[in-house]
Every structure is written in structure tokens, then in C-alpha cells.
Image: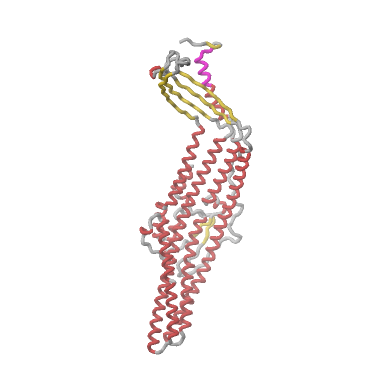
């Protein structure tokens, strides 16, 4: 085949020179690129060293009462990953593990993380050239009124064309990089949302189990009171039959008995609802819930409590970390909006072969190729791009305020829990003293009535006081356990020690 010469350079050299120039453009353009928009900086840690003006101190002790132990706070102490085991309840441990394995809300949050991860990976394809291969085959007949297309001057022929297309958009101003940065931050935001679902789930299981145990204690106390009232009614009925008591006393005691009985069904209803909730949290149907009885007297109160510094809190609470990643994504979106207002470059390369028979493909003279570069720049968009940039900057301000609000709420959450633990301890001590006093009063009133030294009105008052004191004591005991669990949740739940959470976080 004869080679056409152009200024001493062959056509083959021209083609090679064109491909080399295109390759050089593919390589050099990214090197000369810049990234517009602000570079994200993590917010500074809170400029406070404590949660309240008065530091947390050792709590009050109430001996011989469930949940009455002294609690101390160790500043800077790390949280255990399985903090719920500190209550020494195998039933609670089993429920938490079942919930972590089967809870559908947690599984949905994990699936959402996989979606965000794959979306972030999918976008990385914009950083490399896009290559597409195609093949077309046609059997066609040309009109005889126009010149035949093939060189063979035929009107009916086959046409085969394999072709390779390459396109690449150099990220000159960082549009793709900022978009990728935003997607990565969104993935991390979803990750911390999943971690928040984990910490909320574990805390909900523990607190619900504690509430169920408290209800069981209240039910036991109510049943004991009903049995006492029934016994007094029998005594009064006997005395009435013998003429030692009046019908007024008997009617009053019967009314007291029915009032006590009336308090039992609501407690049983609430207990059943809590068991159903525990089953749902554990990821099983209510009909398949394990028959587990919780008893406050079997729980142990954690006594050496961790207390993270505020600077540590913002680095470990998932809601704060999620808000930080939302801020990061909003910052990257500013760069995206700015880059959209700047020129865009597209490089293309096409190569292939066209022949009238498959056997002639890639033969001499059948090949074709093309190199191209296109530059586009927005000239007039009616203010759309300008306002989109302004919206992105306002979105960043919104995310920044939401982050600050989340930090304040997190610190408030810990502060409120610390106050609750202090007051719970004092309240438990007072409730225990009240329960002891009312039990002594009730015992004396019962003996006086049986011996005929006192009227039944004193006994009724003593019974009511004792019932209220007994229930208040149970609630005070439950408050200490529940608020202790709330402290672990408020401090972040120790999720960073769970391998399946921490390893995935470090990998991204």
C-alpha cells in the first residue's frame, strides 16, 4: 500500500503523534487541576472541662436494698463494649445478644450503610476513562437514484463495524473530587446513624428489662397487700359474726380490698406490654418470646462508672459524629456548586474498522480513528448556578448550627443523667426509710386491731401508706438501674470496642 507523505512525515506517524498527544492530555490535565471550594476542618472540641458547675461526686448509700450501693465516677475512664453485663443478669445478656443478631431496625440500618458504601464506590468510576466497545452489522440496499456508497459501486451490501470509544472528563476544578468527598461523608453519616441504632437498641433492651423487673416487684407487693386485706376482711367478718365489729368497719375494709385488687390488672397489662416490647426488640414474634422473669433483687448495680471528658464525648457519641459528617458533606457541596460554574472539558477517542465482509475487518485501509476535545462553559443560566452555590453555602450554615445543637444536647444529656444518678441515690435512701417506717406502722396497727386496742380507720391509713411506700421504693430502685444504663448510652455506649463496628469504621 502506498503511504502518503506530508512534509516528510508519514500518515502512520501522524496517527501515532495524535494518540500520543491525546495520552499526554489525559495525563497532564489532572496534574494541572485544582479543587475549588473550602477544605473541611473538623470542629474544635467544646471549650469546657466538665458537664456541670458542680462536678459529679460519690452517691449516697442505702444498705440492704437492691440498687442501694455507692456509685463513684472515674473521669476519663473508657467504656466497656458489653457494659450491660455489669448488671450481672444472664437474662439481660441473652436478650441483648438476640437483639443485636435479629433486630430488624438494626439490620435495616446496616443495609442502608451498604447502600451508601456502594454508591460511594460507584462514583469513583468518574476518575478513570470510560471505555465502551461496540459492534454493528447491517445488510442494506441503496437507492439507485443516488451514487452507491461502497467503492465497489454496488447497491446492496453488508456493512460490519467494530468500534472502541474512550471518553474522559478531566477533573480540572475538582467537581468530581468534591462530589466524591460528599459521598464519602454521607457514607460515614449513615455509618454513625447505624451505630446510633446499635447503642439505642442495647440501651432500650436493658431499660425495658429493668422496667419489667420493677413491675414484677410492684405486682408482688400488690399481691401481698391484697392477701393482707383479705385476711383482715376475714377477721372482721368473724368479729362481726361474734358482735365485736360493726358493718361500717367491714364495709370500709372490703372497699380497701377492692381498691387494692383494682390496681393489679393495670400492672399486669403493663407487664405484658413490656414483654411484647422485649420480644420485638429481640427480633422475635410476641408469641415466641422467651418466658423470662426479671427480678430487681438479682441485679447488681455498677459502682465504678466511667465519665468521659466533653472533648472525648464529641469524638465517640454517634449522633455528634453523624452531625459532623453531615457538616463535612455540606462543605463539599459548596465545592460542587462552585465547580459547576466553571468550564468543563471532555476528551474523546474513537477507533475501529469498517468492512463489507467480516473476513476483511482490520485489513489494510478499513480502520478509522478520531480524537476530540470539547470545552463547555456556562454563560447564562438565569441565575440558577449562582443561587445553587448560595444554597450550598446556606446548607453548610444549617449543618453547622445542627452540629452545635447536637453537641449541646449531648452534653446536656450527660449532665442530666449525672444529676439523675445523684438524686436517684438520695431518693432511694428516703424511699427505703419511708418503707421501713410505714411497714412498722402497719404491723403495729394490725396488732392493735387484732387485740381490740385500735379502730380500723388507723389500719386502713397504715395499709395505704405502706402500699404507696412499697411501690415508691420499687420505682426508686428501678430508677437507679435505668439511669445507670442511660449514662452508658449518653457516653456513647462503647461501640468503638465492638470489632464489627470499629473495624468497618477504621476501614473507611
Magenta stretch prevailing secondary structure: helix
Q: Nearer the viewer, residue 100 or 77?
A: 100
Residue 351 place in picture, x, y as percent:
47, 22
Compared to 418, does 384 lie above or below? Answer: above
Q: Tell me which corner region of the image, top left, top right, bottom left or bottom right, holds residue 391.
A: top right
Give left or right: position of 366 versus 57: left
The residue sitting at the bottom extreme is 243
Residue 449 place in picture, x, y as percent:
44, 84
Q: Residue at x 42, y 56 (%)?
A: 281
Quadrant into which the N terminus falls:
top left
Q: Which residues are magenta?
A: 9-20
Compared to 155, does 465 lie above or below? Answer: below
Total tally of numbered discs in the picture: 0
The residue sitting at the front extreme is 145
Residue 448 seen in this snapshot: no
Residue 260 seen in this snapshot: yes
Amino acid at each position: 500500500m502506498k503511504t502518503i507523505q506530508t512534509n516528510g512525515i508519514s500518515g502512520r506517524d501522524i496517527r501515532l503523534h495524535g494518540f500520543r498527544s491525546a495520552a499526554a492530555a489525559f495525563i497532564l490535565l489532572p496534574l494541572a487541576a485544582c479543587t475549588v471550594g473550602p477544605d473541611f476542618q473538623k470542629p474544635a472540641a467544646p471549650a469546657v472541662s466538665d458537664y456541670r458547675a458542680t462536678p459529679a461526686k460519690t452517691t449516697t448509700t442505702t444498705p440492704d436494698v437492691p440498687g442501694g450501693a455507692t456509685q463513684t465516677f472515674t473521669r476519663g475512664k473508657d467504656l466497656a463494649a458489653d457494659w450491660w453485663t455489669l448488671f450481672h443478669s444472664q437474662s439481660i445478656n441473652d436478650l441483648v445478644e438476640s437483639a443485636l443478631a435479629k433486630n430488624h431496625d438494626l439490620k435495616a440500618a446496616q443495609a442502608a450503610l451498604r447502600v451508601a458504601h456502594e454508591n460511594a464506590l460507584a462514583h469513583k468510576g468518574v476518575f478513570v476513562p470510560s471505555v465502551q466497545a461496540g459492534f454493528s452489522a447491517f445488510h442494506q440496499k441503496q437507492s439507485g437514484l443516488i451514487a452507491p456508497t461502497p467503492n465497489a459501486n454496488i447497491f446492496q451490501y453488508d456493512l460490519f463495524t467494530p468500534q472502541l470509544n474512550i471518553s474522559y472528563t478531566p477533573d480540572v476544578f475538582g467537581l468530581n473530587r468534591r462530589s466524591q468527598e460528599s459521598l464519602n461523608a454521607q457514607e460515614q453519616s449513615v455509618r454513625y446513624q447505624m451505630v446510633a441504632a446499635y447503642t439505642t437498641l442495647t440501651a432500650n433492651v436493658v431499660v425495658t428489662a429493668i422496667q419489667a423487673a420493677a413491675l414484677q416487684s410492684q405486682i408482688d407487693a400488690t399481691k401481698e397487700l391484697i392477701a393482707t386485706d383479705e385476711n383482715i376482711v376475714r377477721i372482721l367478718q368473724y368479729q362481726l359474726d361474734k358482735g365485736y365489729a360493726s358493718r361500717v368497719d367491714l364495709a370500709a375494709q372490703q372497699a380497701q380490698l377492692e381498691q387494692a385488687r383494682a390496681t393489679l390488672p393495670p400492672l399486669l397489662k403493663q407487664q405484658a406490654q413490656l414483654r411484647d416490647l422485649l420480644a420485638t426488640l429481640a427480633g422475635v414474634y410476641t408469641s415466641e418470646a422467651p418466658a423470662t422473669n426479671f427480678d430487681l433483687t438479682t441485679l447488681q448495680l455498677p459502682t465504678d462508672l466511667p465519665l468521659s471528658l466533653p472533648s472525648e464525648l464529641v469524638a465517640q457519641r454517634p449522633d455528634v459524629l453523624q452531625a459532623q459528617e453531615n457538616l463535612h458533606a455540606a462543605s463539599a457541596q459548596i465545592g460542587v456548586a462552585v465547580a459547576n460554574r466553571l468550564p468543563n472539558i471532555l476528551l474523546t477517542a474513537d477507533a475501529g474498522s469498517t468492512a463489507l465482509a467480516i473476513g476483511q475487518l482490520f485489513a489494510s485501509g478499513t480502520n478509522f480513528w478520531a480524537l476530540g476535545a470539547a470545552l463547555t462553559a456556562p454563560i447564562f443560566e438565569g441565575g440558577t448556578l449562582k443561587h445553587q452555590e448560595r444554597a450550598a453555602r446556606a446548607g453548610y450554615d444549617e449543618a453547622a448550627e445542627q452540629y452545635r445543637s447536637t453537641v449541646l444536647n449531648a452534653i446536656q444529656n450527660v449532665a442530666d443523667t449525672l444529676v439523675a444518678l445523684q438524686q436517684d441515690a438520695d431518693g432511694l435512701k428516703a424511699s427505703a426509710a419511708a418503707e421501713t417506717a410505714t411497714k412498722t406502722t402497719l404491723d403495729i396497727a394490725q396488732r392493735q386491731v387484732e387485740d381490740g386496742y385500735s379502730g380500723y380507720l388507723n389500719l386502713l391509713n397504715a395499709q395505704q401508706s405502706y402500699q404507696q411506700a412499697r411501690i415508691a421504693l420499687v420505682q426508686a430502685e428501678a430508677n437507679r438501674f435505668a439511669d445507670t444504663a442511660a449514662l452508658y448510652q449518653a457516653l456513647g455506649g462503647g461501640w468503638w470496642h465492638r470489632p464489627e463496628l470499629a473495624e468497618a469504621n477504621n476501614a473507611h
